[in-house]
Amino acid sequence: MKPLKISAHPARRVASTLAVGAVALGLTACDKGSGVSQQLDSAVEKGEQAVADARTKAEDVMQNAQDQLEQGASSVRGTIDDVGITARVHAALAEDPELRAAEITVGTVNGKVTLDGKVPTTTVRDRAESIAKTVSGVASVDNQLIVLAG
């Protein structure tokens, strides 16, 4: 007799186990009054249904896992984009001689840049905002810079 080969795929193992269990249950439920063939057919039918149900559940689990993986990847891509935008805004601000000495903190979430800190004049405040808006990937700028009274 050839040994039974069980798949390494989890969904198939579950389905095979359920099918074998259904067949065994059907056979043990046989009584003397009914035909073995009829009970075997019923057990096979139940086993096939169990396999179909297990396959459907396994496919649902796999789809859910894939969806979560894609959501996670999208979130990581968004975070990487935000980090890049922040770095580009910092670099652009540092290139401007009037803004180099200013205490400006840049934060980015989903392309929305927030400028925080202290600047000496409203002209510098407005210039920082203008420069930030020109950076690739910036969706909007929330200018929270405070002008020091001088």
Image: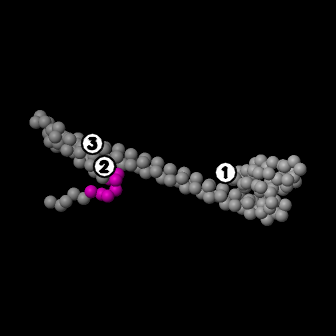
Q: Where is residue 107 in the image (x, y as percent from the top left)?
A: 70, 53
- Would residue 68 be visible to someone looking at this image? yes
Q: Distance between the residues labelled 1 and 3?
A: 53 Å
Q: Mark 1 points at which residue?
A: 109
Apparent side of residue 118 relative to residue 29 in the rendered image (left or right): right
Q: Position of residue 68 (x, y in %)?
A: 50, 50
Apparent side of residue 129 relative to residue 64 in the rendered image (left or right): right
- Tell me, for residue 46, which label it has, or none: 3
- Compared with 79, 48 (above or below) is above
Three-letter amino acid code at disc 3? Lys
Q: Where is residue 113 in the image (x, y as percent from the top left)?
A: 72, 52
Residue at 10% from the left image edge and 36% from the top image edge: 32
Three-letter amino acid code at disc 1? Val
| Range shown magenta | 6-12
The mark closer to the camera, 1 or 3, is: 1
Q: Is mark 1 on a helix, strand or loop?
A: strand
Q: Mark 2 points at which residue?
A: 15
- Considering depth in this image, is 6 or 74 the residue closer to the camera? 74
Looking at the image, tell me whether mark 1 or mark 2 is earlier in sequence order.
2
Q: Quadrant of residue 101?
A: bottom right
Magenta span has 95? no
Looking at the image, tell me whether mark 3 or mark 2 is earlier in sequence order.
2
Q: Distance between the residues labelled 3 and 2?
A: 12 Å
**Dots 1, 2 in contact, CB < 8 A:** no
Residue at 73% from the left image edge and 50% from the top image edge: 114
